[in-house]
Structure formats: C-alpha cells, structure tokens
Image: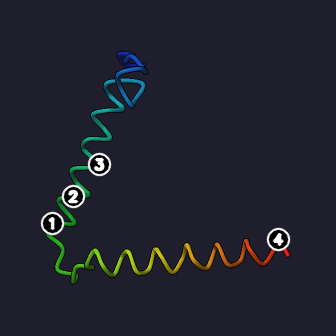
Amino acid sequence: MGTRLDPYIHEHDTAEEAEAFDRALSERVDRAMNSTKPGVTHEQVMKEARALLNAQRAKKAGKRD
C-alpha cells in the first residue's frame, strides 16, 4: 500500500494511484492528439446529446400516462 492522500484534497487514495491515473490520461490525450480520424464539432456532439436527452424525456413522459 502506498502513501495515503487526504480525501478532502486529493481525488485518489494513494500517490501511486494518482500517478497511474495521470500516466493513463496523458497516454489518452497523446493518442487523441496524434489521431488521424476526423474530429467531431462541438455542434455535432451537442446535437446528438440533445437528441438523446429528448428521447429519454419523451420515454419518461410516456410512462407517466
């Protein structure tokens, strides 16, 4: 078990967990920055999110009746 971190200050329980998370996040960011896949615009993401939310709301409203 590694060095315990104060839960009121730190998101992770130990310094080792925090370092592992930082490494994994850095790797994900590096892969994303080096990706050749086309990017998705903010507008497209928001359009899809709104559609999902609206569908969930409609489904929930239908269950009330």
**Residue 23 image point, x, y percent:** 24, 44
- Element marked by disc 1: helix
In the rendered image, which quarter contains the N terminus?
A: top left
**Quarter of the rendering containing residue 22:** top left
Between marks 2 and 3 in the image, the one whose residue lies nearer the viewer:
2
**Tag 4–tag 2 contact (CB < 8 Å):** no
Residue 40 at x, y = what percent? 27, 79
Q: Which mark is residue 24?
A: 3
Callout 2, which amino acid?
A: Val
Report how many numbered discs are placed on residues in the image. 4
**Furthest-left residue in view?**
34
Among the two numbered marks 4 and 3 on one chain, the one whose residue lies closer to the N terminus: 3
Task: Mark 1: give few (<14), some (14-19) or many (20+) Cα within 10 Å.
Answer: few
Q: Nearer the viewer, residue 40 or 27?
A: 40
Q: Amino acid at mark 4?
A: Arg
| First in residue order: circle 4 vs circle 1 | 1
* Residue where numbered disc 2 is placed: 29
Query: Label 4, label 3: how many angstroms apart (C-alpha)?
Result: 43 Å
Determine contact: label 1, label 2, CB under 8 Å: yes
Q: Are marks 2 and 3 in contact (CB under 8 Å)?
A: no
- Do labels 4 and 1 touch, CB within 8 Å? no
Q: Considering depth in this image, is 44 or 25 the residue closer to the camera?
A: 44
Asked if the residue under mark 3 is in contact with the one under mark 4, i.e. CB atoms within 8 Å, the reply is no
